[in-house]
Image (spheres, rainbow, N blue to C red):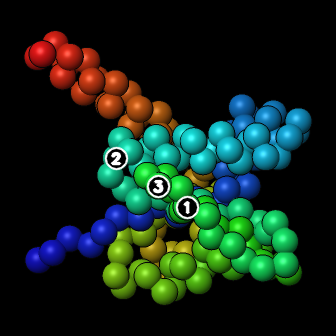
Amino acid sequence: MATLPKFLIVDGHSVIFAWPELRAMHNRKTFNARSELVKILTGYQDHSGVRVVAVFDGQGKTASNESQLGGIQVFYSASGQTADTVIERLVAKYVDRCDILVATSDHLEQETIYALGAQWISAEELHTLVSESEKEFSRFLKDYQKKR
């Protein structure tokens, strides 16, 4: 039996407001907090092999999708929509083809994601997941360097 591709979909602002270091950045400049979260999630994608998608509330009149070579996918909701709407559409569309985990601390969104057939973790649990991945990757690099 083939394994399904693994995806992590992140409710960007839910995570920013749950992580004190990002919330402090957001209070000074939203762009910096978003950029730092994308940087952290790109590192997680690189360490874990799990494809990551970050979704933020809109930046204009139309939904947009950004992706840099080797980076994560970033979506912004359209005007009048929320990131939750984009996340729910992604989950509904891909849940049968992918193993999807959604990171959000929004309780209503957690229930909706679960009802759609995906799993969820809180923003705090994502912080732990990312930290553990970074530690594991550091151990791997140290072991690799010792063998050289």
Residue 67 picture location, percent across and down? 55, 61
Q: Which residue is mark 3?
A: 69
**Which residue is found at the position 12% from the left and 16% from the top?**
148
Q: In the image, residue 6 lies at what x, y percent?
A: 35, 64
Q: Is residue 139 left or right of residue 12?
A: left
Q: Quadrant of residue 37?
A: top right
Q: Are marks 1 and 3 in contact (CB under 8 Å)?
A: yes
Measuring from the top left, give residue 40's x and y in whole percent: 55, 40
Q: Is residue 73 visible?
A: yes
The type of residue carrying mark 2 is Ser
Between disc 2 and disc 1, the foreground one is 1
In three-dimensional space, the C-alpha distance between marks 1 and 3, rounded to whole angstroms, equals 7 Å
At 73% from the left edge and 55% from the top edge, which residue is drawn? 13
- Asked if one can make out residue 83 in the rendered structure from this viewpoint, the answer is no
Residue bearing the label numbered 1: 67
What's the residue type where badge 1 is placed?
Ser
Q: CA distance from mark 3 to mark 2?
A: 17 Å
Q: Earlier in the sequence, mark 3 or mark 2?
A: 2
- Density class for disc 2 (Cα within 10 Å; few <14, some 14-19, many ≥20) is some
Residue at point 79% right, 46% down?
31
**Mark 2 → mark 1, Cα distance in angstroms:** 18 Å
Give the label, 3 or 2, closer to the camera.
3
Q: Secondary structure at mark 1?
A: strand
